Amino acid sequence: MSDIDPTTQTELEAAVFRRLVAHLRNRSDVQNIDMMNLAGFCRNCLSNWLKDAADERGLSLTKDQSREHVYGMPYDEWKRTHQTEASPDQQARFEAQAKGH
């Protein structure tokens, strides 16, 4: 991608982010703990990164606003509607993975 100008590269990267967020909204069956165990990031990470980017630019974006952007609804509503209790195996894998970081 070295021959793509910076503006176009930013636009492409933004399109990829929007597609990833849309994909995750459609895959509410995939739990955050599974994403963390497999990939080391989840929807909450994406929303935190979005807030960090806004903060770096001096823009006002709350944690709740960034989560709502990623989840497509208020976080508490998403948890109530889609989040299941983590199994002992999921929790053990998460804790083991966290020790490695």
Image (cartoon, rainbow, N blue to C red):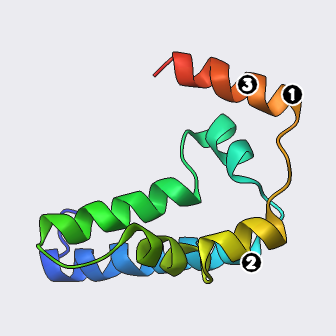
First in residue order: circle 1 vs circle 3: 1
Instruction: Point out the frontmost of discs 1 and 3.
Output: 1
Instruction: Classify mark 2: helix, strand or loop.
Output: helix
Q: Quadrant of residue 82?
A: bottom right
The CA distance from mark 2 to mark 1 is: 26 Å
Whether residue 6 is situated above or below residue 37 in the rendered picture: below
* Whether residue 5 is visible: no
In the figure, is residue 38 to the left or right of 80? left
Identity of the amino acid at label 1? Pro
Residue 93's tag is 3
Per the image, the residue denoted by label 2 is: 26
First in residue order: circle 2 vs circle 3: 2
Whether residue 30 is situated above or below residue 70 in the rendered picture: above
Identity of the residue drawn at 60% across and 83% down: 72
Identity of the residue drawn at 65% across and 18% down: 96
Residue 80 pos. (x, y %) = 79, 69
**Is the residue marked by circle 2 packed among few (<14), some (14-19), or many (20+) residues within 10 Å?**
few
Whether residue 100 is situated above or below residue 72 in the rendered picture: above
In the figure, is residue 50 to the left or right of 43? left
Identity of the residue drawn at 46% across and 72% down: 64
Per the image, the residue denoted by label 1 is: 88
Residue 69 pos. (x, y %) = 49, 80
First in residue order: circle 2 vs circle 1: 2
